[in-house]
């Protein structure tokens, strides 16, 4: 029966009662818990009972994709109601300097390049990426592989499809986010010169900005990092421009991969995995957030703010309160799921019984899959009239200035830095960026995210505050937009003493361009420092949260209904009292199954040590679900009007004892006036529908 229901939900718009309803109701994706390691076939029946919903299948890189091989590996997933994603299909292209090779470290090619540089820094071939992201032979090979994989998995997964296809795990221009002077190969340099023509009207204009003397475009060469470290501080443009080009080249290669997957399956989401901290190696999220559909890893607030439509995943290696807190925190930030790394083989035994980690993890996975996080994703993040600038040019300048300081102090050479070094390098730009995120979150504020290209009078029009985290490199257009914003009486907050001292090409300005502009300078963006400024601008939430521990508060909107999520800022040893106070009475209840809302202006609850409490605020009572027999089927609807734009309803098949199997949970999104026709439950079983917003449920028969 429930396999029928699952198939029904997969092609839901074709089976709804009426064309109008088809536009108002849809199957809704749940939070996915995916086990990375392959298991014996006898283990898979036990995974759904642990709240695990899928697994992984490796791409076939060393031989043509074999449909029979794929079917064999998909079979245990399909037999047990599990999904899957396709992993590492083009790692040899996207992660050339960080991928598994027998009997070698994963980054041996990168460390070999470092060794060659130490022995002969004048060798011009050291900085030629192999393969080049622009190599036409490699591109043709990768496009065929991606398209074939997407087509075969679409056929085998029908009527559904895999969760996503991963282009490559831990990709990067070099070794993940390690800084390196890739790619100075012929194809890349030719493309760089074409790129420069789009930024400079002539070689003479380039020479003036670069402080160079190239005779023609074909003679132009970028500055190496070693040269930039030794150069005068007047212009770093020959280095900065090349780094900007390589960021765009990397993002373009990701877009190329997505297009190849689309050719095989136009609806299959495309991913990159192993997301890094914003910074070097191509990890410019202003570009990457627009290049794919799914990112595993990386800073959720940044990535999701730059592109709210992205599906975000994380990887989990442990079972602990700290980990449960982190997963829920990421779910509040829009995460779609988690990939479990089972290095200790302690999640499930070969016979399908839970391992130690699986047993303790199951309640948390089931809670994440209960529909609560899905209802948040079916809502819209409520962002305050605060904007924050994500300035990759400022990061580039900060990185280079730090390496120059290190060189002057006799520090380690730049070329000895690794991806781990870059990950841990909490420089001034990152401190300011993540300090602003944490400070605003502590005040209950989610900002609008702006990039240099989007920092315009039009995008700033609805904002009251603009935050500039270590924005030391600003274009003339950005300077003009900031000046106009501040001079209009709105508030600009900056931590750098002289924002925009360099332009976006790395040329030092003779006079700080924002001198005389009213800017609030803060040494840190901590909550205590931000609160007076936020209060003066009138952007603080009207909702008050009183708790005995530090909390983070996040707001969402669903039609005219609001959701308020409150979570302890870090894991606590035990429950904590929490009171939510509202400016006026409203219909108030916790999200999830339970009693109807009460008309109140405050609610006192006990906050879980790791999980959030999510409140539903509605101007009117919310409807309950209704199940009605219609011929041989069942009609699902709501029994009254609702101020919400989209309700998430849980569908459970109950056994004779009234128990629901968590593996059989399905979700459907419903507009208030919609209806859905389902098959009737088989003899001895009942169908239960639960509305998460209103808490009501209906059971049939």
Image (cartoon, rainbow, N blue to C red):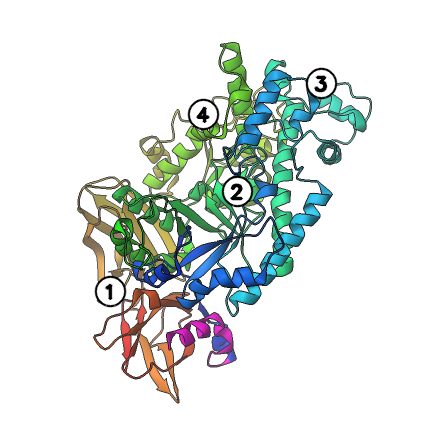
Local secondary structure at mark 1: loop
- Indicate which label's residue lies in the foreground, 2 or 1: 1
Residue 80 falls left or right of residue 406: left
Magenta-highlighted residues? 1-18
Question: Which comes before the other along the chain, label 2 or label 4?
Answer: 4
Q: Distance between the Cα atoms at labels 4 and 1?
A: 47 Å
Q: Distance between the Cα atoms at labels 2 and 4?
A: 25 Å
Q: Distance between the Cα atoms at labels 2 and 1?
A: 38 Å
Name the residue tied to disc 1.
597
Q: Which residue is pictured at 68% across the width and 46% down the height?
A: 139
Question: Which comes before the other along the chain, label 2 or label 3?
Answer: 3
Question: Which comes before the other along the chain, label 4 or label 1?
Answer: 4
Q: Residue furthest front?
A: 103
Classify mark 1: residues with Cα within 10 Å, few (<14), some (14-19) or many (20+). many
Q: Distance between the Cα atoms at labels 4 and 3?
A: 28 Å
Q: Nearer the viewer, residue 602 or 182?
A: 182
Name the residue tied to disc 3.
211
Let me know if residue 59 is in the magenta part. Answer: no
Local secondary structure at mark 4: helix
Up/down of 262 relative to 414, above or below: below
Up/down of 239 relative to 195, above or below: above
Q: Distance between the Cα atoms at labels 3 and 1?
A: 68 Å
Residue 18 can be seen, yes or no: yes
Residue 674 can be seen, yes or no: no
Q: Nearer the viewer, residue 340 or 350?
A: 350
Name the residue tied to disc 2.
460
Name the residue tied to disc 4.
428
Q: Which residue is pictured at 45% across the width and 73% down the height?
A: 7
Q: Distance between the Cα atoms at labels 2 and 3?
A: 34 Å
- Indicate which label's residue lies in the foreground, 2 or 4: 4
Q: Which residue is pictured at 36% across the width and 33% down the height?
A: 530
């Amino acid at each position: 029966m429930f396999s029928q229901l699952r198939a029904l939900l997969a092609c839901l718009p074709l089976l709804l009662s009426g064309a109008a309803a088809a536009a108002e109701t849809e199957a809704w994706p749940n939070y996915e818990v995916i086990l990375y390691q392959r298991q014996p076939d006898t283990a898979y029946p036990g995974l759904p009972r642990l709240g695990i919903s899928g697994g992984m299948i490796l791409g076939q890189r060393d031989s043509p994709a074999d449909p029979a091989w794929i079917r064999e590996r998909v079979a245990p997933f399909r037999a047990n109601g599990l999904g899957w994603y396709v992993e590492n299909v083009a790692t040899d292209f996207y992660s050339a300097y960080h991928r598994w090779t027998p009997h070698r470290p994963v980054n041996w090619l990168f460390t070999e390049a470092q060794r060659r540089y130490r022995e002969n820094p004048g060798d011009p071939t050291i900085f030629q990426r192999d393969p080049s992201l622009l190599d036409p032979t490699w591109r043709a090979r990768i496009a065929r592989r991606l398209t074939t994989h997407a087509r075969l998995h679409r056929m085998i997964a029908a009527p559904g499809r895999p969760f996503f296809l991963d282009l490559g795990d831990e990709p990067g221009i070099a070794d993940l986010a390690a800084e390196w002077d890739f790619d100075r190969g012929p194809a890349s340099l030719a493309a760089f010169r074409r790129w420069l023509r789009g930024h400079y009207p002539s070689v003479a204009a380039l020479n003036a900005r670069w402080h160079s003397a190239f005779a023609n475009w074909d003679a132009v060469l970028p500055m190496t990092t070693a040269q930039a470290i030794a150069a005068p501080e007047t212009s770093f443009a020959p280095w900065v421009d090349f780094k900007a080009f390589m960021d765009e080249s990397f993002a373009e290669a990701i877009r190329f991969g997505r297009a190849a997957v689309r050719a095989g399956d136009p609806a299959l989401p495309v991913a990159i995995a192993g997301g890094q901290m914003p910074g070097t190696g191509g990890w410019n999220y202003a570009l990457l957030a627009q290049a794919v559909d799914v990112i595993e890893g990386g800073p959720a607030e940044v990535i999701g703010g730059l592109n709210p439509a992205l599906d975000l995943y994380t990887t989990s290696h442990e079972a602990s309160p700290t980990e449960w807190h982190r997963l829920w925190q990421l779910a509040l930030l829009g995460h779609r799921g988690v990939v479990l790394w089972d290095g200790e083989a302690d999640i499930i035994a070969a016979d399908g019984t839970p391992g130690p980690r699986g047993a303790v993890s199951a309640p948390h996975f089931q809670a994440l899959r209960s529909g609560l996080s899905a209802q948040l994703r079916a809502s819209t993040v409520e962002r305050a009239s605060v904007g924050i600038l994500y300035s990759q040019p400022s990061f580039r300048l900060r990185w280079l200035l730090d390496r120059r300081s290190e060189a002057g102090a006799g520090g380690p050479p730049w070329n000895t830095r690794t991806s781990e070094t870059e990950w841990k390098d909490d420089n001034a730009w990152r401190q300011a960026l993540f300090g602003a995120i944490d400070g605003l979150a502590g005040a209950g504020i989610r900002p609008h995210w702006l990039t240099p290209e989007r920092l315009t009078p039009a995008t700033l029009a609805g904002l009251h505050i603009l935050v500039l985290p270590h924005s030391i490199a600003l274009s003339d257009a950005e300077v003009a937009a900031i000046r106009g914003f501040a001079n209009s009486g709105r508030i600009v907050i900056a931590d750098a003493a002289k924002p925009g001292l360099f332009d976006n090409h790395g040329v030092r300005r003779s006079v700080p361009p924002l001198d005389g502009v009213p800017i609030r300078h803060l040494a840190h963006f901590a909550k205590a420092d931000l609160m007076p400024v936020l209060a003066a601008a009138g952007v603080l939430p009207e909702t008050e949260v009183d708790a005995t521990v530090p909390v983070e508060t996040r707001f969402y909107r669903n039609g005219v209904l609001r959701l308020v999520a409150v979570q302890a800022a870090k894991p606590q040893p035990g429950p904590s009292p929490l009171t939510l106070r509202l400016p006026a009475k409203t219909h108030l209840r916790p999200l999830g199954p339970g009693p109807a809302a009460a008309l109140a202006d405050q609610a006192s609850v006990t906050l879980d040590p790791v999980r959030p409490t999510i409140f539903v605020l509605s101007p009117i009572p919310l409807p309950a679900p209704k199940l009605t027999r219609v011929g041989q089927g069942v009609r699902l609807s709501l029994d009254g009007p609702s101020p919400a734009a989209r309700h998430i309803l849980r569908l459970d098949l109950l056994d004779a004892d009234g128990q629901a199997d968590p593996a059989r949970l399905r979700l459907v999104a419903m507009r208030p006036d919609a209806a859905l026709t389902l098959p009737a439950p088989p003899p001895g079983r009942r169908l239960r529908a639960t509305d998460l917003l209103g808490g009501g449920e209906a059971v049939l028969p």
